[in-house]
Image (spheres, rainbow, N blue to C red):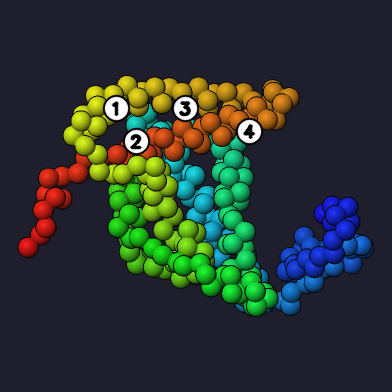
Amino acid sequence: FDKKMRNQARKVLLVLDNATCHVHGAQLKNVKLLFLPPNTTSKLQPLDHGVIKCFKNEYRQCALRYVIARMDGCESASELSKKISIGDAVDWIKTSWKNIGQEVITKCFVSCGISSREVERQSDLFDESTAEDQLAELSKLAGIEYDPESFQHEAAVECFDDYSADWEERLLVNESAEGSNSVSDEEFSDTVCNRQQVKLSTQATLRKIDELIRNSDEMTNESVTNLLFKLKNELERIVVSEKNLKQSQIVSFFQKI
C-alpha cells in the first residue's frame, strides 16, 4: 500500500486500532500510522459506526438469494446447507464488500467525527428510509419469521439509506426495479404457463454452474472463475425476481371502507 501511494505521489494517514495484528514501528514513506487509544474503538472507529453492519447486511442478502434460488430443488434445510461451499462464502464476502459504496464509508467517518465541513454537508444530503412491509414480505418468501422488534434493534446504527437494516426489503425492491409487481391477466397467465419450465431450466443451470465452480480450481485463468460466480449471482437474482412475481387480487382495486 505504501508503494502504491508513493507511485501516486500521495501521502495518507492510516487510522488503526490496537489489534495485535497491527505492528507498531513500521517504517513507511508515504503512509503515516495513527493508532487509536485503547477501549475507544466503539466511539472513534468507522467500522463500528455502520461499516461492519452494512457488510453483514450485504452478506445476508447474498446468502438469502442463494437459499431462495435453490429451495425448490431441496427437500430439507439440512440438504440445502450442505450445498454451501467455502467458495460461495468467499464470493459473498467479495460481492458484499464491493457493494458498499463510498458514500457509506463517508457517512460512517462523519458519524465518528472524522470529516470536513464539505463532507458533512454532502452526507446530510442522503436520506434514510425503511420499508417494513417489503421486509416482512420477503421474509415470508424465504420462510423466515419476521420480528419488527428485532428489525428496530438491527436498525439502531444509522447508515446510508440503501444499507439500513431492511436488507430483505432492498433485495425485494432491487429484483423488482425493472417492472411492477402488478401484472395484467394475460401477462400473469403466460407466466404461470411457463413458470415450471423456467424454474426447472434455471435450477438445472445453477446446478451446472455450481459444478463448474467446484471444479474451477484446476483452471489457471482466474477470470473464468469470476465470470462463473457473476453468472451464478445473476441467475439467483432472476429466481428471486420470478418468485416475487404475483398477480394483484381483485380487492386491491377497491378502497376499503
Looking at the rendered structure, the secondary structure element under dot 3 is helix
Q: Earlier in the sequence, mark 1 or mark 4?
A: 1
Query: Residue 133, how many percent across, how many down?
Result: 30, 58
- Report, in whole angstroms, how far the alpha carbon at label 1 lies from the one at label 2: 8 Å
- Report, in whole angstroms, how far the alpha carbon at label 4 lies from the one at label 2: 25 Å
- Report, in whole angstroms, how far the alpha carbon at label 2 lies from the one at label 3: 15 Å
Which residue was labeled with disc 2?
Answer: 242
Q: Nearer the viewer, residue 143 or 244?
A: 244
Marks 1 and 4 in Cβ contact (< 8 Å)? no
Q: Is residue 127 above or below residue 222?
A: below
Which residue was labeled with disc 1?
Answer: 195
Which residue was labeled with disc 4?
Answer: 226
Q: Is residue 112 above or below residue 96?
A: below
Q: Earlier in the sequence, mark 4 or mark 2?
A: 4
Q: Quadrant of residue 185?
A: top left
Which residue was labeled with disc 3?
Answer: 206
Q: Is residue 54 above or below residue 15?
A: above
Query: Residue 46, how many percent across, how many down?
Result: 63, 68
